[in-house]
Structures are given as C-alpha cells and as structure tokens.
Image (tube, grey):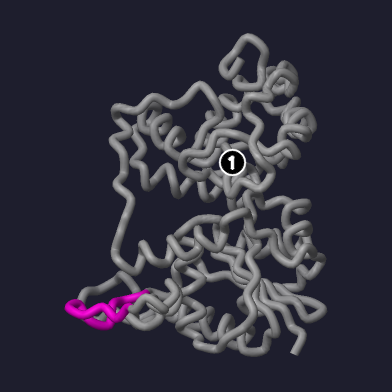
Amino acid sequence: MNNILIITESRTVAKAIAQALDINVPDKGYFGKNGIAVTWTGGGIISARPKCKFQFTVSSDMTADETFAANFNFNIRKDSKGKNTRRPDDRDTAQMSVIERLWKNSGKVYNAMKPSAPGEVMFACISNYIGVPRPVGRLWLNSITRSEITAAFYGDGNEPEGYGGFHDNAIAEYSIGARPIEPDYSQAEPSDKLWCMEDLKAAALRLWGWSPAKTAGVAYALYNKGLVSYPADNATTLPAHILDNAGTVFANLRYHPVLGKKAESAAVTGNEVFRTEETAAHHGIMLTGLYPIDLSREEDMLYTVTASHILDVFTPGMAGE
C-alpha cells in the first residue's frame, strides 16, 4: 500500500496542489495520478460534539489527541437548513465517502489544511471520524505557490519549528472550549508596517464597514487562490527567501492598472527590519507574484488595498522606511 493522500479544505487549493505535483487528473471528489490523490473538505466537514456535558475524561498520561478522541463524538456536519430535520448535506456525505475511501487505500496521509489551529482541529476531526490509523505528514503552506507546494511535498512535509507544541495546544484549547476574543477593530489602526489578519480586519472595517468574519472570508479566498500568503494574526515579518524574491514579485504587477506605478517604485533594499527566521510558523502578509485575475468585486477590493499597502512598505520614503 504505497498510495498517498493529501487533504485540504478548498477545491481551489486541491487543484493548485495537483497542478504543482503534475497529478491534475480530475476524478469524482479528487484529483489524482500515479498513486497520489488530492481531495478537499469544503471547510469543517466533520463536527466534534462532547460526549457528555458533565464529565470530561482526562489523565496525566493522555496526549491532547487522545483526550480529544476520548471526549468527543465525530460526525458529518449537519445541514444548516431547517431546525427539526437537520441532517448531513448530500454533497458532504458524498465527499466524505470519497475521502474515507481514499484514506483507507492510502499508505500515508498529508494534512494540507490551512496553517492554523482550526486547520489542525479539522484534520483531527476527519482522522477520528474515519478511525483508521495512518502515518501523517504536514504540508504547512504559508503560500499556495508551486515552489512551496513541491518543496513541502518532496521534503516529506515541512512542519515549522515547534509544530508539535502548536498542534497539541490547538487540539487542547478546542477540547476545553477556549476561543480567542475578537478585538474591537473600530478602535484599531492598521499598521504602517507589514499587515497581519488583524490589520486587514481593521482596514476593511474603516474603509467599507466589513465585519471581521467577512474580511477573514475574503482574505482566505485570496490565500486559496494563491495571491497572498496566509493571513495569520500578529505576524509582521518575512523570512529571507521571501525578501530575496520580493523584487520579482513586485515586477509582475508593473502592468496592473491600479498598482503598476507603485510596483515600479518598490524596492527591496533597506528592509532588513522585516527579516525573520526561516523556521517561523507564520509571517506577515505578502504577495506571491501571481497576477490577480477572475476576482470577485470584494476580493479585488481587499487585494488592491493589501497589495497597495505592501508596495508602500517597500517604497523608499513611504511606510516601513
């Protein structure tokens, strides 16, 4: 059994991964070729519900994953339509059947969910629902680009430094019901340095009155389409390999009708202040160099504002100097 399965959230990301690995042969619910399959979930396809409201099974020798498995039931998410007749959507049921079949036929599974705590939880939910142990690797994709996908896959995963602790914390916090408190973005000023997700939410609220949830959804759509790096919270620096390629990235926007002039003025030199360790789990939001096409109106709005700010940061005499 040498088959390999890669699971991600978005069909768009699954297609990008398949294209990067030259396995872009479509089948029902996945792309695959040469013993490698890439499938998608459409978000949190498996829900986790506590087995008991009044009792929590835990001991000092249990791992975070074992505690999660012991205290929750895992089922296909229910359709949100209707209150008394809620059941799994037929499309989710069919897609989960595909994922389960591919999982059971695989020798190794790669988690290519978003590089975030929810990504860890969603994958763990699928693993517990299927209940068939498989070796697992992590494709930690800060950008949906061919170079990052191939480097991660052919390197047998690219877990960042401290990933084990990050994973355990994500599962443990979900298990005990800990949820981050959303800041009051009406009082927040977007940074004049590189932006993170919190800066995007503050900027979109000021400019267009968008809710934090709406901004996050549009930002993740831009990430899924490979246009920006993963919009993590509180990360505002860049690793060396991204800084070193920034000039090429900006040059690809020279003919953009709105961003072209800024792209010609942007410079990479003198921005060592933005440099961070290559092993950092996340970094500030950065353009990937892919030219923006086929965007919705809201995607275009957020992309243009984000790209314009990034170019300002790298332009002498502007922000970030």
Q: Is residue 286 left or right of residue 247?
A: left
Residue type at the position of mark 1: His
Work out whether 245 lies above or below 154: above
Provide the secondary structure element on which disc 1 rests. loop
Residue bounds of the magenta highlight = 48-58
Please identify the dominant SS of the magenta region. loop
**Can residue 276 be seen at all in this image of the molecule?**
yes
The residue under the point 36% across, 32% down is 205
The residue under the point 67% across, 77% down is 5
For the view shown, which residue lies furthest in the top direction?
A: 317
The residue under the point 62% across, 54% down is 161
The residue under the point 62% across, 83% down is 134
Q: Is residue 115 left or right of residue 155?
A: left
Residue 82 x %, y % = 25, 74
Residue 21 x %, y % = 79, 64
- Whether 49 is among the magenta residues is yes
Q: Quadrant of residue 100?
A: bottom right
> Where is the N terminus found, in terms of image quarters?
bottom right
Residue with the mark numbered 1? 283
